[in-house]
């Protein structure tokens, strides 16, 4: 993807979360090669810090005070011009559909819950920094729910490029939903991890850009969009 | 209405003929409704006292809905247990259709009674009695006008859409005209017409003056009332949150402090509490108790609580009432239990409801075991999972590796068993 990082280069991270306790816990948990260059606790300060520091990755809490009440999604909107170089990984205590889909549609490259371990979150940060997407089983479940497991291409008004998942992508999503890691998915489907990553990135792009009728209705039903 | 030892205060019932006064009074006094109704009719016959008493009670006693709203308001500021909270939600409010059906039925009764009364009076006049029609018609006009106007207060709230609001206003004006017209007609018997018209102008002038002076005050009072009402609602909501947090989160935090030496228990307590709180805050979907998704999640919750383990459930789609649902859920429970007993790490559960079959995958991160080497007497796997699924017409596949074990369960939804195409 756009900004490949060399192995020895440290990944610069900005932490955005309104809970001081959580920030300090995360600081202690993140592995050594991740350098925290800034912290913020509100929408305004987050946009300012990110604009100044231009980090590789922003760990972004979904629920943030300040701004117009839009939380993490508002920070993403405010940093839209940086999205090419700065990757956002959304964090939340909640794994409810509302939170997940809103930030992903706003441009986040992945989503993890706050109960995740330090190693897992460090891995997720590296993955996002490398241009890949981070899908939790829950997020994969949402995608399968929203795009439907039995897509019918014959229905009119569907942009095949964006509104349908390929069979392979569905398989990958299902395995992730079943709790498989990318490596395990690759082994299961006899493909390389790189291929799994590209499938997941494709799904993320579709999730962000699709105007598929079912997706909208699904989101409206759950009061998300 | 339930009758208790202590006498309840008068609350107008919402299942009454006119405004529920008789019904409410009967509940209050402990008499049958028919006695009270007869009493009012008898009092009415004795020079109309019954009508006045009825009107007086109508104005000064709260309707059942108002009294319920009052209870809700005071409820909001008191602490209560979760059970009470659940009970309150389930009580609900009678559906609008029921209410309109009731309204329609009593309206017919009322009209019938009125027509019957006129017929009786006409008959009496025909028989030679001197009926004062010049008093009866205006009196009926007044009663009809009052009924028309007052029933609006009980029937609809002003917050409706503009159409229903216009209708309410129309009825109110019609009722006003009827009542004023009736009063004027009665007066015209004793006062001359020219005096009456002059008096009317005077009255109009007085009313206009009063309105001009008092309108800003009235508007101010109305605004105050609205502000007071919304702040009271906000306070009730805050109290609601505080009560819930007290009952759930604070209690759990106390337990966590006590058990701080047991990391697994602390973790599970935190997780269970988190789920419960999230369900309370965000759960807007109506959950169907019999849905396989709900059943599986509640089984997963039980295992979390029982075994102090994390069980992650991801569900896609919904299904209920298919053949073998019970067996599927029971086998899943068994598989989750095995995973919780024999393996470490998070247990991932994935449920997918397709058109033709329901699939459940239960995966753990244990060191795995040899599926073929399971002893015959190990009921857990052979009987409760494979055997159970087979008998119910489903399929169970167990795959075990060094990195974990996965139990794949599938149950066809239609009667003819479809070949599953998942590898």
Image (tube, rainbow, N blue to C red):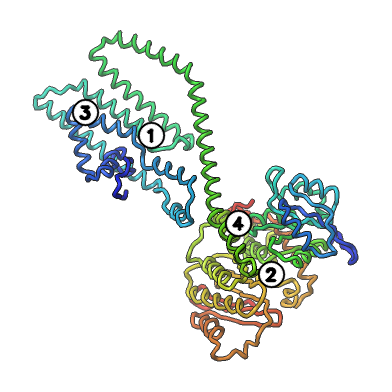
Q: What's the mark number on residue B152?
A: 1
- Which quadrant of the figure contains the C terminus of chain B? bottom right
Mark 3 highlights which residue? B48
Q: What's the mark number on residue A218?
A: 4
Residue at coordinates 44% horizontally, 16% vertically from top-left?
Answer: B210
Q: CA distance from mark 4 to mark 3?
A: 63 Å
Question: Do pointers 2 and 3 mark residues of a single chain?
Answer: no
Q: Quadrant of residue B167?
A: top left
Q: CA distance from mark 4 to mark 1?
A: 41 Å
Give the residue at the far left of this rendering. B127
Name the element at disc 4.
helix
Q: Residues within 10 Å of mark 4 (few under 14, many from 20)?
A: some
Where residue A101 appears, as percent x and y from the top left, is 67, 56
Name the element at disc 3.
loop
Which is more N-terminal, label 2 or label 4?
Answer: 2
Which is more N-terminal, label 1 or label 3?
Answer: 3
Name the element at disc 1.
helix
């Amino acid at each position: 993807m756009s900004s490949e990082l060399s192995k020895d280069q440290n990944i610069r991270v900005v932490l955005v979360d309104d809970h001081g306790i959580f920030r300090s816990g995360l600081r202690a948990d993140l592995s050594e090669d991740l350098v925290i260059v800034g912290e913020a606790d509100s929408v305004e300060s987050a946009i300012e810090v990110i604009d100044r520091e231009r980090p590789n990755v922003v760990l972004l809490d979904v629920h943030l005070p300040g701004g117009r009440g839009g939380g993490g999604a508002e920070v993403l909107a405010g940093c839209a011009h940086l999205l090419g170089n700065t990757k956002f990984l959304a964090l939340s205590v909640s794994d409810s559909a509302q939170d997940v889909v809103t930030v992903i549609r706003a441009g986040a490259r992945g989503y993890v819950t706050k109960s995740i371990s330090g190693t897992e979150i460090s891995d997720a940060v590296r993955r996002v920094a490398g241009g890949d997407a981070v899908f939790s089983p829950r997020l994969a479940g949402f995608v399968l729910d929203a795009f439907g497991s039995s897509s019918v291409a014959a229905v009119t008004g569907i942009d095949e490029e964006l509104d349908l998942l390929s069979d392979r992508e569905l398989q990958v999503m299902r395995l992730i939903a079943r709790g498989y890691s990318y490596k395990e998915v690759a082994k299961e489907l006899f493909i390389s991890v790189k291929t799994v990553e590209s499938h997941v990135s494709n799904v993320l792009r579709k999730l962000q850009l699709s105007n598929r009728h079912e997706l909208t209705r699904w989101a409206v039903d759950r009061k998300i969009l | 209405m339930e009758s208790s030892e202590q006498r309840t205060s008068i609350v107008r019932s919402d299942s009454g003929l006119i405004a529920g006064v008789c019904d409410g009074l009967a509940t209050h006094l402990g008499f049958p409704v028919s006695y009270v109704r007869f009493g009012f009719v008898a009092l009415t016959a004795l020079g109309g006292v019954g009508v006045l008493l009825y009107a007086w009670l109508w104005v000064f006693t709260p309707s059942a809905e108002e009294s319920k709203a009052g209870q809700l308001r005071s409820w909001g500021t008191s602490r209560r247990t979760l059970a009470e909270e659940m009970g309150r939600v389930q009580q609900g409010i009678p559906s609008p259709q029921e209410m309109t059906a009731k309204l329609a039925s009593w309206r017919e009764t009322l009209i019938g009674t009125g027509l019957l009364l006129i017929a009786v009076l006409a008959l009496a006049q025909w028989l030679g009695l001197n009926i004062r029609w010049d008093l009866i018609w205006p009196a009926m006009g007044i009663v009809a006008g009052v009924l028309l106007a007052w029933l609006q207060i009980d029937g609809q709230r002003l917050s409706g859409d503009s159409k229903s609001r216009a209708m309410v206003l129309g009825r109110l004006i019609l009722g006003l005209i009827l009542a004023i017209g009736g009063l004027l007609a009665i007066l015209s018997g004793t006062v001359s017409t020219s005096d009456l018209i002059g008096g009317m102008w005077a009255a109009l002038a007085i009313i206009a003056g009063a309105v001009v002076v008092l309108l800003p005050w009235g508007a101010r009072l109305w605004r105050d009332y609205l502000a007071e009402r919304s702040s009271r609602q906000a306070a009730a909501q805050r109290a609601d949150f505080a009560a819930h947090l007290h009952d759930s989160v604070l209690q759990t935090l106390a337990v966590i402090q006590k058990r701080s030496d047991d990391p697994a228990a602390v973790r599970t307590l935190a997780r269970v509490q988190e789920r419960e709180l999230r369900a309370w805050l965000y759960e807007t979907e109506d959950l169907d108790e019999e849905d396989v998704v709900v059943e599986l999640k509640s089984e997963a919750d039980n295992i979390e609580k029982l075994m102090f383990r994390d069980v992650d459930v991801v569900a896609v789609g919904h299904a209920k009432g298919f053949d073998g649902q019970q067996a599927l859920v029971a086998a899943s429970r068994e598989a989750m239990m095995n995973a919780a007993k024999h393996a470490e790490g998070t247990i991932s559960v994935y449920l997918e409801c397709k058109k033709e079959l329901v699939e459940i995958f239960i995966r753990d991160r244990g060191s795995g075991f040899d599926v073929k080497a399971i002893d015959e007497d190990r009921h857990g796997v052979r009987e409760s999972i494979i055997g159970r699924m087979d008998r119910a017409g489903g399929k169970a596949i167990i795959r075990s590796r060094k990195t974990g074990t996965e139990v794949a369960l599938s149950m066809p939804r239609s009667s003819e068993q479809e070949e599953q195409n998942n590898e």
